[in-house]
Image: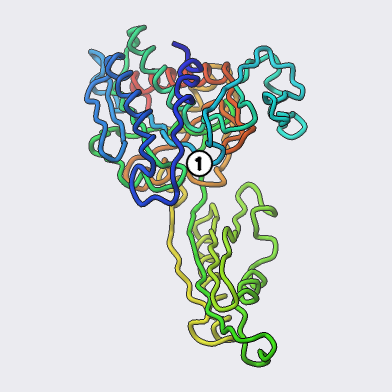
C-alpha cells in the first residue's frame, strides 16, 4: 500500500484533541485510530505491540539476522489533530498533475493559491491531496503515521536487512500534554526521529525555548462617576503591561532565530483581568533574559500601583533540543542529510519557530530531531499533502534505516 493511500484511510477517522480536558488522551476518539493502527501492526508482523490506557501505541521490528548489534532506531508520529475545523467528516480531494495555479477547494469558495502559498509553485505537475475547504486535512500528523507504517510494510515485504526498529504513535501532541507520559524504557530506542515536519527535505533539530506566563491583575472597581483617585482599572493595567515590553519583539515582527513575547488571551473586567503570555527564544541565555525582564516588569508595575496588583505565574514548557542533539548526537543530522541526498533531495535545515514532541523527548533522554512528511499549511482549511513528497519521505526513511543498519553513526 502507498503512503498516500494510508493517509486517505487515516484522515477519515477524526481525532481532534480537546484542550479543555484534564485526561490523556484528551479525547476518546484518538483510540479509534490507535486501535486501527494496532490491528495493522499485527498484520504487518510488528512484535511487542502495546496500546496503553493513555493511548500510546508502541511496537517493534526485531533486527534481522546479523544486524542485532546495530543501534535501535525509533520513529514517532502523533495521532491527534487540532480541534479547529473538525465539525464534520473530512472529505479529501485529489488533484492530479497540479498546474501550479489557483486551486479551488471544493465548492467552499476558498482558493489554494501560489500567490498566498509560494511553495505551491514547486509542486507543478505533482498530485495534491487537499481539503474541500471546510475542514482540516489531518496530514498533521497522519501523513507521518502513514509514512512510518509504509516503512514497516516495505522492510517486511522486501525483506530489507535492518537493525532493531521501534515505532510509536502518541496522543495530544497538539496541546503539548501527551508526551510527558511517553515510556522511554518500553520504547527502548537509542535515538529516534519524529515525523512531524512539512516540506520535502525539511530537517529540524532546533526549536524554541518556551515558557508560559500569566498576569493575574487586581484592580479596584467603583462607580465611574465618582472614581477619581479611587478606581484602578485592571483593563488599563493589562494594556500597560504590553507597553513595558519591547515593542517589536512580537510574532508579527520576528522571524528565524528571533524570539518574542506574545499575549494569547486577555479576559476580565475593571476589577480583575487575566492575561496569558508565551515567551519564546532559540537562544537559552536570551530566553532567560526575557523571563527575567518579564518578572522585572511585574516588579516595576507593583511598585507603581501597589504590592500584589500584578501576580505572575511563570512556567517553562520545553527547551531547544539542539542542546541534546549537538555535538554528541550529530550523527542523527548527518545521516538524515545523507539519506535525503541519496534521493537527490536538498535538505532544508531551518529552526522550528515552535516545539515538537521530539524536543521534550530529547530532554527525557531520547535524542529526537524532526523529519518532513510532505504535508503543508497545517492547522487550517488550506492544509494539503503532496503524494510524491510522501513517497520520497518513505524512501528517505528506508535510507536512514540502511545507514544505521550498516553501523554508520
Seen from the viewer's position, the closer of residues 80 and 292 is 80
Question: At which x and y percent is residue 160?
Answer: 35, 10
Question: In the picture, residue 226 is in which quadrant?
Answer: bottom right
Regarding residue 106, the answer to whether it shows in the image is yes
Q: Residue at x 74, y 20 (%)?
A: 100
Total tally of numbered discs in the picture: 1
Which quadrant of the rendered structure holds the C terminus?
A: top left
Residue 80, relative to residue 240: is it above or below? above
Which quadrant holds the N terminus?
top left
Occupied quadrant, residue 170 = top left
Q: Which residue is found at the position 48% from the left and 82% from the top?
A: 308
Observer-nearest of 112 and 110: 110
Q: Quadrant of residue 293?
A: bottom right
Residue ranking furthest to the top: 158
Residue at image x 48%, y 36%? 81
Instruction: Point out residue 402 in the picture as x, y percentages from the top left corner.
Output: 39, 17
Q: Is residue 7 left or right of residue 360?
A: right
Q: Which residue is mark 1?
A: 83
- Residue 178 lies left or right of residue 52; in this view the side is right
Residue 184: x and y in percent read: 27, 40
Task: Say which residue appears at 69% left-offset and 65% top-offset.
Answer: 247
Residue 74, percent across and down?
A: 34, 29
Q: In this rendered view, identify the residue nearer to me: 17 or 117.
A: 17
Other residues around mark 1 within 10 Å, as few (<14) / some (14–19) / many (≥20): some
Residue 7 higher or lower than 197, as above or below: above
Query: Is 311 located above or below residue 401 in the figure?
Result: below
Amino acid at each position: 500500500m502507498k503512503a498516500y493511500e494510508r493517509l486517505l484511510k487515516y484522515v477519515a477517522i477524526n481525532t481532534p484533541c480537546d484542550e479543555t480536558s484534564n485526561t490523556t488522551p484528551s479525547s476518546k476518539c484518538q483510540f479509534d485510530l490507535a486501535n486501527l493502527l494496532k490491528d495493522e501492526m499485527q498484520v504487518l508482523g510488528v512484535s511487542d505491540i502495546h496500546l496503553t490506557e493513555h493511548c500510546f501505541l508502541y511496537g517493534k521490528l526485531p533486527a534481522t539476522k546479523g544486524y542485532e548489534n546495530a543501534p535501535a532506531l525509533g520513529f514517532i508520529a502523533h495521532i491527534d489533530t487540532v480541534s479547529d475545523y473538525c465539525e464534520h467528516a473530512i472529505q479529501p480531494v485529489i488533484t492530479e498533475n497540479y498546474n501550479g495555479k489557483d486551486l479551488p477547494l471544493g465548492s467552499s469558495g476558498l482558493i489554494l493559491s501560489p500567490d498566498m502559498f509560494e511553495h505551491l509553485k514547486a509542486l507543478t505537475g505533482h498530485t495534491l491531496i487537499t481539503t474541500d475547504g471546510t475542514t482540516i486535512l489531518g496530514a498533521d500528523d497522519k501523513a507521518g503515521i502513514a509514512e512510518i507504517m509504509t516503512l514497516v510494510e516495505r522492510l517486511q515485504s522486501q525483506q530489507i536487512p535492518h537493525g532493531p526498529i521501534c515505532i510509536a504513535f502518541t496522543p495530544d501532541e497538539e496541546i503539548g500534554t501527551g508526551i510527558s507520559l511517553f515510556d522511554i524504557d518500553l520504547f527502548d530506542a537509542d535515538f529516534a526521529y519524529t515525523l512531524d515536519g512539512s516540506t520535502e527535505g525539511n530537517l529540524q533539530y532546533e526549536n524554541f525555548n518556551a515558557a508560559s506566563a500569566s498576569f493575574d491583575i487586581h484592580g479596584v472597581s467603583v462607580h465611574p462617576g465618582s472614581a477619581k483617585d479611587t478606581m484602578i482599572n485592571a483593563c488599563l493595567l493589562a494594556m500597560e503591561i504590553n507597553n513595558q515590553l519591547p515593542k517589536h519583539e512580537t510574532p508579527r515582527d520576528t522571524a528565524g532565530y528571533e524570539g518574542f513575547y506574545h499575549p494569547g488571551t486577555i479576559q476580565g473586567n475593571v476589577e480583575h483581568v487575566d492575561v496569558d503570555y508565551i515567551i519564546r527564544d532559540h537562544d537559552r541565555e536570551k530566553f532567560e533574559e526575557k523571563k527575567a525582564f518579564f518578572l522585572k516588569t511585574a516588579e516595576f508595575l507593583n511598585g507603581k500601583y501597589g504590592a500584589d496588583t500584578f501576580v505572575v505565574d511563570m512556567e517553562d514548557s520545553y527547551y531547544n533540543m539542539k542542546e541534546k542533539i549537538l555535538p554528541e548526537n550529530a550523527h542523527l543530522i548527518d545521516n538524515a542529510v545523507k539519506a535525503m541526498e541519496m534521493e537527490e533531495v536538498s535538505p532544508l535545515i531551518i529552526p522550528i519557530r515552535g516545539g515538537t514532541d521530539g524536543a521534550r523527548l530529547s530532554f527525557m533522554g531520547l535524542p529526537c530531531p524532526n523529519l518532513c512528511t510532505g504535508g503543508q499549511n497545517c492547522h487550517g482549511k488550506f492544509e494539503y499533502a503532496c503524494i510524491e513528497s510522501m513517497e520520497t519521505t518513505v524512501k528517505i526513511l528506508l535510507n536512514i534505516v540502511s545507514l544505521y543498519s550498516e553501523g554508520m553513526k
